[in-house]
Amino acid sequence: MRMRQVEYIDLPADETIELAPGGDHVMLFQLKTPLQEGQSFPLSLTFEKAGTLEVEVKVYPVGSAGPGED
Ligand SMILES: [Cu+2]
């Protein structure tokens, strides 16, 4: 899969945008420690008009489809 880094994702008020494996996703760079399967950590998402939202990220195995498949 080819990925292209973008600075932002457009979020029209009347549309639902899903971040998921194989589609648009958040990619973490320059981690200070490796991620451990099963661990969770907070991640801040910054929105142009809605401010910052903190979400809890759970680490799934490499190749997992993410929540809902386990
Ligand atoms: Cu990526």
Image (spheres, helix red, strand yellow):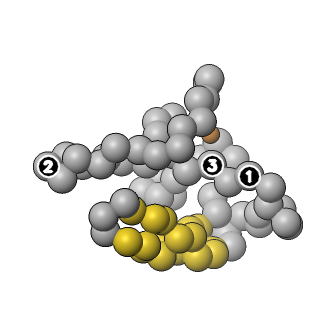
> What's the distance in space between the residues labelled 2 and 1, CA to CA?
31 Å
Check disc 1 and report its element: helix, strand or loop: loop
> What's the distance in space between the residues labelled 3 and 2, CA to CA?
25 Å
Check disc 2 and report its element: helix, strand or loop: loop
**Residue type indicated by callout 3:** Met
Give above or below for 3 relative to 63: above
User: Where is ligand 1, by quadrant?
Assistant: top right
> What's the distance in space between the residues labelled 1 and 3, CA to CA?
7 Å
Is 56 displayed left or right of 3 in the figure?
left
Q: At x 14% / y 49%, what residue is drawn?
A: 14
Residue assigned mark 3: 27
Q: Is mark 3 within 8 Å of ligand 1?
A: yes
Q: Quadrant of residue 63?
A: top right
Residue assigned mark 2: 14
**Residue type indicated by callout 2:** Asp
Q: Horizontal and vertical percent for residue 15? A: 19, 46
Res 52 label: none
Q: Quadrant of residue 43?
A: bottom right
Judge whether residue 9 can be spotted in this image.
yes
Q: At x 41% / y 44%, what residue is drawn?
A: 9
